[in-house]
């Protein structure tokens, strides 16, 4: 029996136009297959079939207007009822955790509520105190730790109910989280590992010192890696699994300026030669090693650019989330891969470092492990001289729901802590601040005896049998491979939350007086002979004095136990790290006909380029190759850009699915969260969205799968807000689209100064591998977008695209013949002047201002008998790049016939001066000024934006058609091509206020 397919609840919209009919009579379709696409003035959305079956009658055609209930088609053999959209079943609801008790009634005697009073500091009844502690100990012994925790939780709940002020539980005492008894022991050979570590340390320091002998300009850091060597070594020997044909590989974000340590290890592994080490920081000639991790400069080695502090942590968090996204969408296997992130304690000051830790906990990213190297120092001095960075970070991470593992004290402290029955040692550890801890390691054992242990007679007694040397040897957790191994093991086991390891170390460890734990350590890049000999002795590096003086690297023979051990460890872990590779398959660019619809005129129908783009994305979602790889990323602006149709169609990624029935569940564009959802809805979080975009744009190397991220944002909150991340994206060779929507200083009307973008194109132009466009018409957008897909995802070029999209609705003409090449190169002749007028002008426009240019040309022709050639400039940025390259080539070949830049090719044989205008600052259009001999006048929107109507704004910034006409006449008058009185008349006619100040001053 035939059933109707009708329009479901589409919210407040009525009389919405059908823009695509996707089925015909006789088609067999499945439930939820799209039947038609409808489009309001803001967004387009597909209407899915409520049932499977054969299409019988089509009741609508393109151009028809429909509302809720309108019948679209009939379907036979349909099983489900049509009209009202079925109620969605709430998916992925997790079962409620069962109570652990059998409905136990709280039988505890109720006590009188009291007003909160601070906790007493004195022990007024030590016997009672001991009874409590004994009770706890006996529960732990007899019923286990889980029961003990349960009881404590109950007691704490009761205490809160009674109004007690409880101790601050954000932090735990200043001791290791893992007690010695619970430490998992390393299976490694400590003697060999110690030697390997010594060689890596030596070679890392030597390469920095050698480079600076060549030239002090080269710089480098010794102290950072010196403090982190053990943290890296334990990971390299025991934990980090490389990518190979059986496993996707762990991803390690190395702290930027610890790079010498990674090179030094790669040297021992035989991956780098001593000549390459000699080329540290000399990157201009081939073969040198980059100063910091830069995939752009060492594309087979480094994976993640981390040296701009704060970017590593936020990018890594979104990387971990994206890994789960790929797994949950069924695009890659879950292999238990981990993401390790190495950070400086000073780096944790960056807002980006801590800014996304809430998301990591919320998304239960147990594939993520942060290791913060807490050497207590940054560049100028202590990170937190007056308090303790480890405690501060513990509080922040615990508060956000992370698993925190503190690695503060090394094994030499274990016995002292075991002997400390009264808790006085822990009290002393708790009360000391980092400024003191730093000084302890700079000033030697007797100083520590006096200043640390000496505060309490009991502690002086505790270390009375230790020599000053013994006290000096009391090590910090981050330098103790046993403690580090135990922490890494625990982090690997943890499930349900991300882990942070807070490891206490010494900056410049082993550097002696000149560089250990002193405020100037960070910039220490030279070691004199004495320092070098000290460093060699400290770590027992088998080099002669002469070799030390020559600053030779040390590498034992290939047959030595150290090299065999080190290689064997890496072999067992699947290969070397870091290494960058890609085995991703290309994505075939979609057939031309997907884009054909955009090449035609829209007739009277008006739409914005944003709408055209969203339509293109909707069409791409029907292409079976492209569809699964699209990653639409939106920071809470889907409705602004008319993308709410995606919610239903492809779902919003949510790792827990949707645990609630959305308030708008009856509507077609209902908010649908799904474990396998495709849209990354990032909330109001541009840095996070950009980090997601980078993760998706580099999936081809990090996960061997080519993805197509499309991040759409308010253009003002793009490069300006996250410029450094965009730079890192370029370094990472991310591929994908950035769409600066609601673009243009006067096109986004009514939003004001902080919203109206007049320079994002210029910011984009500074990133060498960012290709940017400011298209006006749908066919330009389609041509550019299609080429972007082809270049990036089919040809695998390491570029990314920035395209500005506007929210101004207007009709779009048909694509003029033969302009594809010009659209992509940056300009093409949109319309030629009729050559009937008395003189001629070349009008160049980009984005929405091209339309003002077109209108101005009509006035010029009709009222002033002036012909204009109209050029649509899709990219002043690309034109400039071509111009610069051509000019350089010509200067280098003075004896050859000069080549023409593309701008010259277009304009040199044309008559009249050039008038160029855009919705960006004049610097944008001015970019091509050097590449033409003609008189060049540029107009733009220099100055702060402000809220008003588009018309008023264009008048204010002097980029409306009237100003363009008047300025053109003036320019022609200057060239003596028209009389100046004509220009004067026009200025009067259009009521242009000559007294008004230059907009940039207002
Ligand atoms: C965004 C940014 N600002 C400043 C710097 C310059 N810088 C490099 S290292 C450093 C100090 C780092 O201290 P910390 O994070 O504690 O690392 P450590 O060397 O102590 O391990 C600074 C300020 C940078 N690399 N990035
Ligand atoms: Mg530090």
Image (cartoon, grey):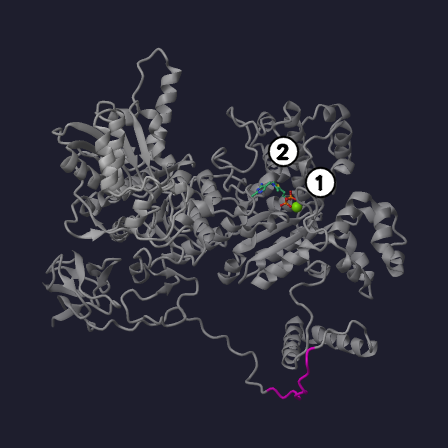
Question: Which quarter of the image is occupied by the N terminus?
Answer: bottom left
State how far apart marks 2 and 1 are (Cα). 13 Å
Q: Is residue 1000 above or below residue 28?
A: above
* Residue under label 2: 220
Question: In this view of the protein, which residue sits in the foreground, 566 or 436?
Answer: 436
| Magenta residue span | 106-116
- The answer to whether the residue bearing label 1 lies less than 8 angstroms from the nearest atom of ligand 1 is no
Element on which disc 1 rests: loop
Residue 990, position as x, y percentages in the image: 24, 42
**Residue 2 drawn at (x, y percent):** 11, 70
Regarding residue 838, the answer to whether it shows in the image is yes
Asked which quadrant contains residue 263, the reply is top right
Asked if the residue at tag 1 contacts the one at tag 2, i.e. Cβ–Cβ closer than 8 Å, the answer is no
User: From the image, which quarter does the C terminus lie in?
Assistant: top left
The residue pinned by badge 1 equals 508
Between 158 and 368, the one lying in front of the other is 158
**Quarter holding residue 664:** bottom left
| 976 is higher (above) or lower (below) than 255 | above
């Amino acid at each position: 029996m035939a059933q109707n397919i009708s329009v479901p609840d589409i919210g407040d919209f009525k009389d919405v136009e059908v823009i695509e009919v996707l089925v015909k009579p006789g088609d067999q379709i499945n439930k939820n297959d799209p039947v038609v696409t409808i489009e309001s003035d803001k967004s387009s959305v597909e209407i899915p079939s409520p049932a499977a079956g054969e299409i019988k009658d089509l009741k609508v055609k393109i151009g028809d207007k429909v509302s809720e209930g309108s019948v679209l088609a009939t379907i036979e053999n349909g099983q489900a009822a049509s009209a009202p959209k079925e109620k969605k079943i709430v998916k992925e609801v997790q079962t409620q955790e069962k109570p652990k008790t059998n409905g136990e009634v709280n039988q505890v005697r109720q006590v009188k509520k009291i007003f909160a009073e601070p906790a007493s500091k004195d022990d007024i009844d030590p016997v009672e105190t001991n009874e409590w502690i004994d009770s706890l100990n006996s529960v732990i012994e007899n019923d286990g730790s889980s029961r003990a925790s349960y009881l404590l939780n109950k007691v704490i709940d009761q205490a809160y109910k009674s109004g007690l002020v409880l101790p601050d539980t954000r932090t735990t005492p200043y001791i290791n989280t893992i007690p010695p008894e619970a430490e998992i022991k390393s299976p490694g050979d400590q003697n060999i590992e110690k030697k390997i570590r010594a060689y890596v340390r030596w070679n890392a320091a030597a390469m920095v010192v050698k480079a600076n002998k060549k030239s002090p300009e080269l710089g480098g850091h010794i102290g950072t890696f010196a403090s982190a060597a053990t943290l890296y070594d334990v990971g390299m020997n025991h934990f980090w699994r490389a990518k190979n044909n059986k496993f996707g590989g762990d991803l390690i974000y190395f702290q930027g300026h610890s790079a010498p340590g990674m090179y030094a290890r790669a040297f021992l592994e035989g991956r780098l030669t001593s000549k390459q080490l000699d080329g540290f920081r000399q990157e201009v000639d081939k073969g040198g090693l980059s100063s910091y991790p830069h995939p752009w400069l060492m594309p087979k080695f480094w994976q993640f650019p981390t040296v701009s502090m704060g970017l590593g942590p936020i990018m890594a968090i979104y990387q971990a989330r994206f890994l789960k996204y790929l797994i949950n969408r069924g695009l890659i296997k879950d292999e238990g891969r981990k993401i390790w992130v190495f950070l400086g304690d000073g780096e944790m000051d960056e807002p980006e470092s801590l800014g996304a830790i809430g998301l990591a906990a919320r998304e239960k990213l147990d594939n993520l492990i942060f290791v913060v190297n807490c050497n207590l120092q940054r560049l100028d001095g202590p990170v937190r001289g007056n308090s303790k960075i480890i405690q501060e970070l513990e509080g922040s991470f615990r508060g956000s729901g992370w698993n925190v593992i503190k690695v503060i004290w090394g094994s030499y402290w274990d016995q002292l802590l075991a002997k400390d029955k009264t808790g006085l040692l822990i009290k002393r550890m708790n009360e000391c601040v980092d400024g003191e801890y730093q000084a302890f390691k700079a000033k030697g054992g007797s100083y520590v005896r006096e200043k640390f242990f000496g505060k309490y007679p009991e502690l002086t007694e505790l270390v009375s049998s230790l020599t000053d040397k013994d006290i000096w040897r009391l090590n910090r957790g981050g330098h103790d491979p046993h403690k580090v191994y135990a922490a890494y093991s625990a982090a690997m086991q943890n499930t349900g939350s991300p882990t942070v390891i807070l490891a206490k170390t010494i900056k410049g460890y082993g550097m002696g007086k000149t560089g250990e734990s002193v405020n100037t350590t960070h910039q220490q890049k030279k070691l004199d002979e004495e320092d070098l000999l000290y460093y060699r002795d400290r770590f027992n590096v088998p080099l002669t004095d002469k070799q030390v003086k020559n600053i030779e690297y040390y590498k034992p023979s290939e047959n030595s136990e150290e090299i065999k051990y080190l290689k064997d460890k890496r072999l067992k872990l699947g290969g070397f790290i870091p290494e960058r590779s890609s085995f991703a398959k290309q994505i075939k660019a979609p057939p031309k006909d997907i884009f054909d619809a955009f090449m035609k005129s829209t007739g009277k129908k008006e739409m914005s380029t944003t709408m055209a783009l969203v339509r293109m994305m909707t069409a791409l979602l029907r292409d079976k190759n492209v569809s699964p790889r699209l990653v639409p990323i939106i920071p809470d602006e889907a409705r602004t850009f008319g993308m709410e149709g995606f919610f239903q169609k492809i779902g919003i990624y949510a790792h827990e699915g949707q645990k609630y029935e959305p308030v708008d569940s009856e509507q077609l564009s209902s908010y649908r969260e799904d474990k396998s959802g495709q849209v990354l809805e990032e909330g109001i979080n541009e840095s996070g969205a950009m980090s997601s975009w980078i993760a998706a744009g580099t999936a081809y190397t990090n996960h061997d799968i080519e993805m197509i991220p499309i991040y759409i944002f308010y253009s003002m909150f793009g490069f300006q807000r996250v410029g450094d991340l965009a730079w890192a994206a370029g370094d990472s060779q991310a591929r994908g689209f950035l769409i600066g929507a609601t673009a243009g200083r006067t096109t986004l009307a009514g939003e004001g100064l902080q919203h109206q973008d007049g320079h994002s194109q210029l910011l984009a132009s500074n990133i060498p591998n960012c290709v940017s466009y400011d298209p006006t018409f749908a066919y330009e957008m389609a041509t550019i977008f299609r080429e972007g897909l082809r270049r990036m995802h089919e040809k695998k070029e390491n570029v990314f695209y920035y395209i500005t999209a506007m929210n101004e609705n207007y009709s779009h003409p048909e694509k003029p013949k033969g302009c594809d090449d010009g659209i992509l190169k940056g300009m093409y002749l949109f319309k030629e002047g009729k050559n009937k007028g008395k003189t001629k002008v070349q009008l160049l426009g980009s984005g929405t201002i091209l339309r003002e240019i077109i209108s101005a040309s009509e006035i010029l022709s009709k009222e002033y008998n002036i012909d204009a050639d109209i050029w649509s400039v899709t990219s002043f940025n690309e034109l400039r790049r071509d111009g610069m390259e051509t000019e350089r080539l010509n200067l280098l070949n003075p004896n050859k016939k000069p080549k023409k830049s593309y701008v010259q090719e277009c304009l040199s044989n044309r008559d009249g001066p050039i008038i160029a205008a855009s919705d960006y600052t004049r610097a944008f259009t001015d970019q091509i000024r050097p590449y033409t001999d003609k008189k060049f006048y540029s107009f733009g929107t220099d100055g702060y934006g402000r809220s008003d109507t588009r018309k008023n704004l264009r008048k204010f910034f002097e980029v409306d058609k009237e100003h363009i006409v008047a300025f053109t006449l003036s320019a022609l008058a200057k060239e003596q091509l028209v009389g100046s009185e004509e220009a004067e008349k026009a200025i009067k006619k259009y009521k242009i206020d000559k007294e008004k100040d230059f907009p940039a001053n207002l």
